[in-house]
């Protein structure tokens, strides 16, 4: 008889695994560690996940999907392009910055276990569509090759994530508010708009 699935157990396994992967690293975390931390029998872990790699893939996919859906909803809204960028920077980015465990996994494990390249491409497409809608924005940005925009987003986005990670692990005197303020300033100056 197949075991019944309980969403609360699945979420406990994911949250516990995320914390362990972020603090110890993927290779230094075993299924036994997850069993010990959750208090669930090993069979329960395998009821929800095929293997340890499957757990990290789902952590990254679900964490990224939540971030992406939030941005996509804003991009598809009837708001002005400037308001869309403002909401992404002031609301959605800070929500992501709070999840330091996901950030740590994105920066260390995501390249090996998920298709981060396609995620960046989808993010680039959304940002590019928003930028194109800004009246009077810098012509330099509108006519830059999409590959350059992609590179800019990767460097900027990964830099933001790395800074958020470092600011949580070391006393650097930088808060999430500082990161958001800096991001708004860079976007405003580079695009010739006020966010």
Image: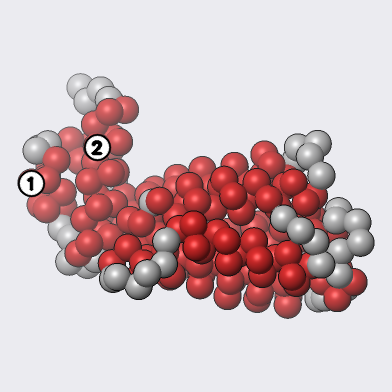
Left-right relation of 182 to 59: right
Left-right relation of 150 to 139: left
Residue matched to label 2: 12
Q: Residue 101: percent from the left, percent from the top?
A: 33, 56
Q: Give the farthest residue toward the front.
A: 173
In the picture, which quadrant includes the C terminus? bottom right
The colour scheme used here is secondary structure
Nearest the camera: 73 or 113?
73
Q: CA distance from mark 1 to mark 2?
A: 12 Å
Nearest the camera: 15 or 116?
15
Quick one: label 1, few (<14), some, or many (20+) residues within 10 Å?
Answer: few
Q: Residue 125: percent from the left, percent from the top?
A: 73, 58
What is the secondary structure assignment of the residue under circle 1?
A: helix
Q: Residue at x 86, y 53 (%)?
A: 133
Residue matched to label 1: 36
Q: Is residue 13 above or below residue 81?
A: above
Q: Residue 56: percent from the left, percent from the top?
A: 34, 54
In the picture, which quadrant includes the N terminus? top left
Q: Residue at x 90, y 71 (%)?
A: 139
Q: Residue 28: percent from the left, percent from the top?
A: 17, 66
What is the secondary structure assignment of the residue under circle 2?
A: helix
Residue 43 visible in the picture: no
């Amino acid at each position: 008889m197949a075991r019944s699935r309980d969403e609360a157990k699945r979420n406990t396994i994911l949250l516990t695994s995320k914390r362990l992967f972020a603090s110890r690293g993927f290779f230094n975390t075993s299924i036994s560690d997850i069993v010990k931390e959750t208090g669930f029998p090993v069979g329960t872990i395998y009821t929800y996940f095929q293997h340890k790699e499957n757990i990290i893939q789902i952590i990254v996919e679900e964490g990224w999907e939540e971030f992406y859906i939030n941005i996509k909803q804003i991009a598809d809204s009837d708001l002005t392009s400037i308001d869309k960028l403002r909401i992404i920077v002031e609301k959605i980015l800070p929500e992501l910055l709070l999840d330091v465990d996901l950030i740590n996994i994105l920066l260390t494990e995501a390249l090996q276990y998920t298709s981060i390249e396609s995620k960046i491409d989808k993010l680039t497409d959304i940002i590019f569509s928003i930028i194109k809608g800004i009246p009077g924005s810098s012509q330099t940005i509108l006519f830059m090759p999409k590959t350059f925009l992609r590179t800019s987003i990767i460097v900027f986005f990964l830099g933001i994530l790395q800074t958020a990670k470092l600011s949580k692990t070391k006393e650097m005197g930088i808060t999430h508010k500082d990161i958001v303020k800096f991001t708004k300033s860079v976007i405003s100056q580079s695009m010739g708009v006020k966010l």
